[in-house]
Image: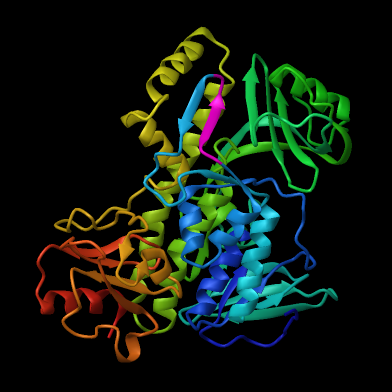
Amino acid sequence: MNGTTRTAAAPRTVIIVGSGPTGLLLAADLATAGVPVTLVEKRPHRISNLSRAFVLHARTLEQLDARGLADELEAQGRSLDRIRLFDRLTVELDTLPSRFNHLLVIPQYEVEKALERRAAEAGVRFVYETEVTGLRQDTDGVTLDVRHPDGEPGELRGAYVVGTDGMHSAVREAVGLPFPGKSVIRSVVLADVRLAEEPESVLTANAVGDAFAFIAPFGDGYYRVIGWHRGRNVPDSEPLGLDEVREITRLSLGRDYGMHDARWMSRFHSDERQAPAYRVGRVFLAGDAAHVHTPAGGQGMNTGLQDAANLGWKLALVVNGHAAPALLDTYQAERHPVGRSVLRSSGGIVRLAMAKRPWTLALRAALTTVLNGVGPAGRKAAGQITGIGYAYRAPRGSHALVGTRVPDVALRGGRLYEALRGGRFVLVTPGPAPRPYEAGDRKDRLVVESWASDRRTTLLVRPDGYVAWAAETPDEAAVEAAVTAAVGD
């Protein structure tokens, strides 16, 4: 679907600005829940093959599994059971407590294709070639000032607006939020090339002395090469030739694999920035509009998709009248600390990879010794990079499981992440529920399942796969109160 409008949107409409992976996942989640969604994009309708992201981590694959997309993407990509961050440091993934105990190498545009198809099927309304020029909000909604493809000004009206429009977010600027941080590495070179020799690994990366290089396949015969040299600090506008890319690759990896036939080359710089708030009134930020960081560890697209998974079900409950607007405050409380942690971890990887001074080299050697293998430190590093190690803060006095991620446990009716499809809560009980909690108006928000094992804990799992409530031996009244508090009457 494509089109523009100069008329006000319905009061329940959520307007999403930016049609990258974060915006597409969020839009489809809301539309699946019955919320009218308009997705605004200033570019023409196309999915570029010049994307920078190349990996999906375990937690993101779990979220995509809950939307019926993971198996399709797994069939298109190539999996790795370990990550080599720099020389001699390996993070093992095959011991992750996840159905997806690996990293999936797949270009971002393949992810976008699947997410866009899902959004279109859910009824999302796409508005292309429309630029946001301003924003006004009041107690009832938000009005976006836009410029239409013909250059004429117009307005779009919605109950809420979410900016998923990248590092240079027009939405973030319109609400006056700063984007503090700094450029970490400058003059990073990027080239899409063919190789005469196939690399030994699906992902190839290393740092030696002043140089770093990374190679990943597109799957169409081309490879993405990213490189950086400490001594080559020039503006992004400086012309780039293939010989420079070859030289950096040889310094870092020992050879250039016979790269040739570059179809695209560019320079860019990598920043570490985070907005101080992810919400201003009825306006939210997610993905690169809220946080940007170095590509180390491949956490960028993954963090944005998990932002969307957190925000979508909360917006849906509020817009549909099943929860109070205060629920939306938990998006900032839960996702801002994760964004801050990702900035620290990805930045730390870059700094250690490019270590040069004796004390930083000694620190890298010590960390390599501690993190290698499958001990506690290695498991913690793997959990942080892949996203499965994050938990959300629970209210005081809550069960120990509240706020933690639930793996894809076996249920009598199938797998948990199959039960989560449709954006519903899942009540997991030791046996048949004492009453049909999902009956009537709750069917679109709640499904009741029971453990396939003899486990006795009762769990209420949020649509994003985290525990909303848990108890060991609850009575019917306690379960009813927990369900009502979470999903409404």
Indicate left or right for 214 with 182 as reference: right
Indicate left or right for 435 with 297 as reference: left
Q: Is residue 164 visible?
A: no
Assign the magenta stretch its main secondary structure: strand
Please say if 351 is above or below 338: above
Residue 471, how many percent across, how many down?
15, 64
Residue 157, how many percent across, how many down?
60, 81
Residue 425 sits in quarter: bottom left
Quadrant where the N terminus sits is bottom right
- Magenta segment boundaries in residue numbering: 80-87
Residue 327 sits in quarter: bottom left
In magenta segment, residue 286? no
- Front residue (pair 159, 114): 114
The residue located at (18%, 68%) in the rendering is 430
Indicate left or right for 148 with 483 as reference: right
The residue located at (44%, 39%) in the rendering is 94
